[in-house]
Amino acid sequence: MHYQHEHPENSPEFKGLNVSKGVTSAPVVNPYFKFQRRRSQYSVNQFVDGLLAHDISILGQAVTLVESSLPGHREIAQQVIEKCLPYAGKSFRLGITGVPGAGKSTFIEALGMHLVRNDKRLAVLAIDPSSERSKGSILGDKTRMEQLSVHPHAFIRPSPSAGSLGGVARKTRETIILCEAAGFDTIFVETVGVGQSETAVHSMVDFFLLLQIAGAGDELQGIKRGIMEMADGIVINKCDGSNVEKAKVARQQLQNALHFFPKTESGWIPEVLTCSSVENTGIADLWKTTENYAEFAKNNNYFELRRHSQAKYWMYESINEQLKNHFYRSDIVAPLLEEKENQVLKSEITSFAAAKQLLDAYFKGV
Amino acid sequence: MHYQHEHPENSPEFKGLNVSKGVTSAPVVNPYFKFQRRRSQYSVNQFVDGLLAHDISILGQAVTLVESSLPGHREIAQQVIEKCLPYAGKSFRLGITGVPGAGKSTFIEALGMHLVRNDKRLAVLAIDPSSERSKGSILGDKTRMEQLSVHPHAFIRPSPSAGSLGGVARKTRETIILCEAAGFDTIFVETVGVGQSETAVHSMVDFFLLLQIAGAGDELQGIKRGIMEMADGIVINKCDGSNVEKAKVARQQLQNALHFFPKTESGWIPEVLTCSSVENTGIADLWKTTENYAEFAKNNNYFELRRHSQAKYWMYESINEQLKNHFYRSDIVAPLLEEKENQVLKSEITSFAAAKQLLDAYFKGV
């Protein structure tokens, strides 16, 4: 089972990364290339065969390949992914978000162990676009997921780094494809909730779980605007010891509050549960709830509809992101942007006039 | 006071629209042009002087000019708007959304009359991007706002039509500038909530009010996902007759539910009120609440921060919309789009591969 907490480019796996001979023609100067070519190299087909044979070692190397930014690696990765596509999709994808302090790692360990003990094969991925974290993501801390990190049927990976949320999301989605081809039937995608990362996770999972703890008094602290409405389920962790009463009260109040939320698209009524990761209570019930959702959504076709919708979403999201990058990074626009913004803020020109001036300059130059 | 319910291009005002001589050089074939040039024409300065003199007749013509799609008219309009900018901004902008049946027109009449009786000068605008409605918008129905529509200190205008929400939003924002320059100190922007119109209204007002009615039982029906979190205030209408108890119960429950929503950016705690537009109760209290908000937000600087944020939002929104239009309408991309989407849905290629293929084709051809 592969496990890595360093930045991909410095990892032992990367240094010994086996890539096909096709890379040698790539116009990239990289000191590792000579090093790599001396070692035996996997072709695209060797990668794919290995994945389909559920070879975790090859899965680890394939994921590292996907996370690499080198053009040569990206070409190979794309071919591997495309060949894996027909074998992907057959898993249940669970998104997990929670503020620091909610006990996410312990929770993932508890739920993850429940699953692998029941013969599931679980991949745990993460989305965390901030670069400091990718060097020390919670999931990189082995001490927090002691049992799960050494279980033969679990594959744990910290967030890729990519410079933008769009890049991180893409690499994660591609990693999901590889994990599914390699026989993992359950995928967790977790996030600490920086920026728009909850939206990204929500857009690539079948069930979005919000991990909470009871706050001081009767309020549930720390839920960002818009996140509660994304949740298919909410679980209040740390329902143990002196916390039990508070957690139960919070559960009831939150369930009541959800009553006032508009109906979900699926027709599913989000449930609020309690659990204790440390005492291992409520975990099985929580998993039963997600299984109930899967059955419900497969019966009314929403499950497939949601996946199709997500696939389209990422196509358009990717297009829009690239269009904006090309515009805002262009030599024509970049020097003018701040000036136009200031003119708008000082009410010298309207927002629309500023936009038009920048666009005219851009399209003229392009 | 101007009042119009027909499509702008067919309105009596448009037919007699006075435009400056500059228009004659515009390369547009328009049968009205000859007709217009025979009449006396307003220059940009005449428009501006008239607006600053609070001439409602000129305001009506200026708004019609802004709503026009003809390139010649847009040029003149832009100049008028730019000269009005220094005089704009000194108003309180209230957004109002509510489902059909919530009694929006009667409510606007009741609140509007309260304001103009207290020496306010009120402009009522609307955002409604669906083209069928623009020919018969609720605000176009004179019978629903009998008193307000004939009050000398009220200016009522139905939604502009523009083919896209972005276009409608732009024209509405520009109309706000003209109204403020013409001395209106209070602006309502209302919407029935089609598509993303609530988001658009929320992004151009100081206070976003959700108009509700008590549903069957204890639920509040019909609130779209994400809208409740946008609200600075919620008012439950039709709190009269046999409805009173139900409305008061609903008010209490909704106030309790709001307790679980994350804090607003401003620090303001949204209030839930009741009112009866027909019996004219709760209206003054509602207005007092918005005044309290204005004071609160001006004291902690959020008022100005929000306006700056909105100005920037519209600049970037406008840029992004145009970039996407150019891409999706291009001769290169349009024929390929459906095919790529289908390949993605059939898992033949990934979302990102599809996006890349389309982008490569687009940038090659551009």
Image (cartoon, coloured by chain):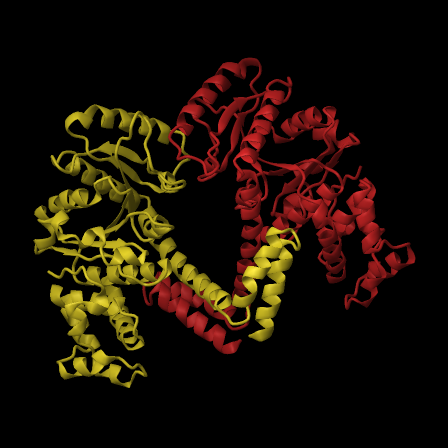
Chain colours: A yellow, B red
Which residue is at 23% across, 59% downward?
A135
- Give how far across and how far down residue A25 sits, in percent: 28, 85
Nearer the observer, A308 or B97: B97
Nearer the observer, B316 or B343: B316
- Give how far across and how far down residue A233 sits, in percent: 29, 38
- Give how far across and how far down residue A206 sits, in percent: 29, 48
**A77 relative to B248 in the view: left or right:** left
The answer to which quarter of the image holds residue B318 is bottom right
Which residue is at 62% across, 51% downward?
A346
Most extreme residue toward the bottom, as rendered? A25
Which image quarter holds the C terminus of chain A?
bottom right
Which residue is at 17% across, 68% downward?
A61
> Number of numbered discs present?
0
Residue A55 makes an appearance in the image: no
The answer to which quarter of the image holds residue A172 is bottom left
Which image quarter holds the N terminus of chain A?
bottom left
Residue B232's place in the image compared with B130, above or below, is: above
Which residue is at 82% across, 48% downward?
B49
The answer to which quarter of the image holds residue A308 is bottom left
Nearer the observer, A108 or B329: A108
**A133 relative to B353 in the view: left or right:** left
Nearer the observer, B175 or B161: B175
**A313 relative to B8 in the view: left or right:** left
Residue A86 makes an appearance in the image: yes
Residue B331's place in the image compared with A254, above or below, is: below
Residue A145's place in the image compared with A1, above or below, is: above
- Give how far across and how far down residue A101 sits, in percent: 24, 40
